[in-house]
């Protein structure tokens, strides 16, 4: 049976894109993933993640990462909630993999609702494939299912690459891009002071940006 794992990296940061990773493989390769030592990407060192991503690619039938830029997130948030965006993004990844069973990291407080909405979204574009698909939607799925851990790793590696490219482009190390990171906060405050606006790779719809602008006013 063909199974897939789907997880995101970068839902919460104020800087940079969100990446949703998907991994498709034969169910009997699950033990191979376990033996590789896959786990939630946050528990694996920065150095080890790219090596693991290469191994995951080698043993998988298909690996796909869907990227949503900061500006796209801002535009979509005018029309829908972050949960709605997650449903659409996860569905795009499903549409590339077409598994018989998908394990997903639930991006909603209600696990079942997220799985149900994801199936409905996938059904719109792929009705025949959706008829044979079952979705297991769980919180912390990246801790439980190796195929979701694998998806979490490929998503994180891609986001890290994009963040490093951004830092090189602007010549500033702005840290992780998360709102709680002091380096990120300092970068946003200094950029805004200097330019009276924030760059396109910042998520303008984030509370962090509101707070910063109110403070500057």
Image: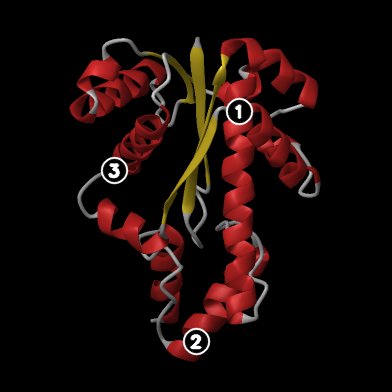
Residue at the image point whose x is 62% and y is 72% from the top: 167
Query: Residue 182: x percent and y percent?
Result: 66, 65
Identify the mark at residue 22; answer none if there is no mark.
Answer: none
Q: CA distance from mark 1 to mark 3?
A: 32 Å
Q: Secondary structure at mark 1?
A: loop
Residue 67 seen in the figure:
yes
First reached walking from the N terminus: tag 3 or tag 2: 3
Display colour scheme = secondary structure
Identify the mark at residue 60; answer none if there is no mark.
Answer: 1
Looking at the picture, tell me which residue is in the foreground, 168 or 125: 125
Q: Residues within 10 Å of mark 2 (few under 14, many from 20)?
A: few
First reached walking from the N terminus: tag 1 or tag 3: 1
Residue at the image point whose x is 24% and y is 45% from the top: 80
Residue 186 seen in the figure:
no
Identify the mark at residue 193; answer none if there is no mark.
Answer: 2
Answer above or below: position of 18 versus 53: below
Q: Which residue is mark 3?
A: 81
* Residue 211 position by quadrant: bottom left
């Amino acid at each position: 049976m063909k199974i897939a794992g789907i997880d995101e990296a970068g839902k919460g940061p104020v800087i940079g894109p969100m990446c949703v990773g998907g991994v498709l493989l034969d169910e009997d390769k699950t033990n191979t993933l376990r033996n590789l030592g896959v786990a939630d990407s946050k528990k694996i060192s920065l150095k080890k993640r790219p090596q693991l991503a290469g191994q995951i690619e080698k043993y998988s039938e298909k690996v796909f990462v869907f990227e949503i830029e900061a500006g796209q997130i801002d535009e979509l948030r005018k029309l829908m909630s972050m949960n709605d965006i997650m449903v659409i993004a996860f569905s795009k990844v499903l549409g590339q993999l077409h598994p018989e069973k998908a394990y997903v990291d639930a991006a909603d407080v209600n696990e079942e609702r997220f799985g149900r909405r994801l199936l409905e979204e996938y059904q719109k574009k792929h009705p025949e494939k959706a008829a044979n698909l079952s979705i297991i939607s769980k919180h912390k799925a990246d801790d439980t299912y190796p195929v979701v851990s694998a998806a979490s790793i490929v998503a994180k590696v891609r986001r890290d690459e994009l963040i490093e490219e951004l830092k090189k482009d602007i010549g500033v190390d702005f840290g992780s891009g998360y709102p709680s990171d002091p380096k990120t906060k300092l970068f946003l405050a200094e950029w805004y002071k200097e330019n009276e606006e924030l760059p396109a790779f910042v998520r303008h719809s984030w509370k962090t940006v509101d707070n910063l602008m109110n403070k500057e006013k």
